[in-house]
Amino acid sequence: MAILNGKKEAELAAGSALAETLPESSKPWYRTWHIVKLNLVLLVPLLSSASLGYDGSMMNGLQTLPQWKHFFGNPEGAILGLMNAVYPLGKVFALFLVTYVSDRFGRKLPVLIGLVTCVGFAIMQGLSQNLATFVTARALLGFFTSFISQPSPVLITELAYPTQRGKVTALYNTFFYFGAIFAAWCTFGTFKIDSTWSWRIPSILQGAVPAFQLLGLYFLPESPRYLVSQGRHEEAHRFFIEYHAGGDADSALVKFEMDEIERAITEEANVLSTTSWLDLIRTPANRKRTFIVLILGWFSQWNGIGVVSYYLTLVLNTIGITEAKDQTLINGLLQIFNWLAATFCGALMVDRIGRRTLFLISTAGMLCSYIAWTGLTSAFVASKGEGMGRAVVAFIFIYYFFYDIAWTPLLQAYTVEIYPYTLRGRGLSFTLITSFVGLIVGNQVNPIAMKSIGWKYYIVFCCLLAVLFVLVWFFFPETKGHTLEEIREVFEGKLENSDIEKTGESEASHNEEDGKYKQDTKQIELA
């Protein structure tokens, strides 16, 4: 995290204009009470990602348990795919509703709804008496998990201290592995129970993290940008005074942030309809943003990660590691490794290394790792050599390291940065919808392909990763060194007041057959 008087660190994170407004202090952030208090309340939305991580790791663990397999009739192929796919399928249907609720009633209300329902349906899942109840509970869990996973990263990026925004928002998705670790070690600890409670306990504990979040939700502030958009400027002003300025009502930082947010939201109100999803593709800049998040969402699932995250058991079976104890242990150790890599080599490096550079390093590393992983698996199948099997496990860890440094911390963080306030919720929902659709397809295709062609299926992902590297190279801009409102200029350039006014006039021409604005109307162009 940045030190309050570290001007270089501040400029690196949020630009020189904001750095000039920071108070002079020799104390680091962890000795500055109002920053500590803010980061403590941000733990509530940060933990939302743990619910998603818990589910994938739990399902990996349950598939290793003989008690679970026997109770549900040894599910495989399409049935196993259905048990996994209903979770993200429920999330997709919910995202349209939660986006409206979040934009209309604030970021906190959907979080409250999601936390309460996730606790209830986790209990239903754990007490299931048949396959239909288990699948229904998972579908409902998926639906209401969207109520916490969509607004949480938006809340974080809109509440965080400006010089810490990039790191804290990137930390959000690293908590995915906190949930994964919790689930992995729960299943490792219960696999010896000779009854259905070996899988019921981990299933019920899926509601433990949401229950903990409920305890702190009361203390979490509402987004100041939402408050400004609703005309509640005084409430937003009080938030900045308390949490960003430590009670200093005359702080230059507070004035800078309030002025910037009020100006940006006014400009967006002139440019956007504020109600239509078509705004995501209305202008050249928004089309570029939406194309980027389409890449982010789809390839977050179709870069090879889906094969391991939900079907690690099938991968380990192909290299001769078949004992439940060994599989659950590897799963548990892998999740700890992932959290450390995503946090210290990814999230905390976003301001130093940059988002674009991390994406390029990550994708290139995943490609090289997958090629090696594929070759070693092929050699193991031919020779059945124990050493080859161990080498495959090593490359699973190496592959995950490269995935963790960018695709874990930046999936949501990069999305909420590149969209302006008015489109931030819809943009993030589009990313998540794309990601969940990719996950649904993967959950149906991956187990069938793994069963049919085994390790040869990995070749598909080697090709996809090569395509992904090219897309990142040509389309992903760097966003470090800007405040949240300034990132708009990376896509649109600096706006003059006359441009803003005239852009509003161009709305009447959106429905023309050629889909372009009239030539005599100024529009926002991509810089």
Image (cartoon, rainbow, N blue to C red):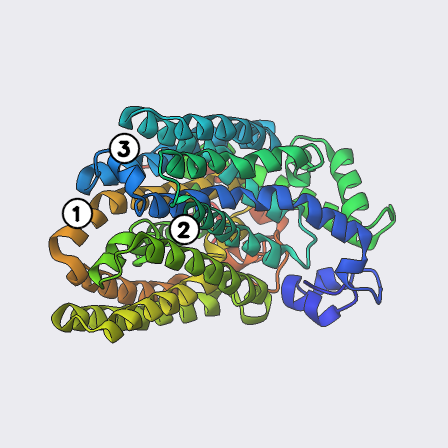
Q: Residue 437: where, in percent of width, then height?
A: 31, 42
Q: Tag 3: residue type?
A: Phe
In primary-sequence order, the first of circles 3 and 2 is 3
Q: Tag 1: residue type?
A: Ile
Q: Nearer the viewer, residue 51 or 348?
A: 51
Q: Residue 155: where, in percent of width, then height?
A: 60, 42
Q: Nearer the viewer, mark 3 or mark 2?
A: 3
User: Is 289 rendered above or below residue 4?
Assistant: above
The answer to whether marks 3 and 1 mark residues whose Cβ atoms lie closer than 8 Å is: no
**What crowding class fits label 2: few (fewer than 14 Cα within 10 Å), some (14-19), or many (20 or more)?**
many
Q: Tag 2: residue type?
A: Val
For disc 1, the marked residue is: 448
For disc 3, the marked residue is: 71
Q: At x 18% / y 42%, what residue is drawn?
A: 77
Q: Nearer the viewer, mark 3 or mark 1?
A: 3
Local secondary structure at mark 1: helix
For disc 2, the marked residue is: 293
Local secondary structure at mark 3: helix
Q: Nearer the viewer, residue 164 or 80?
A: 80
Query: In the picture provided, is 118 more to the left or to the right than 71?
Result: right
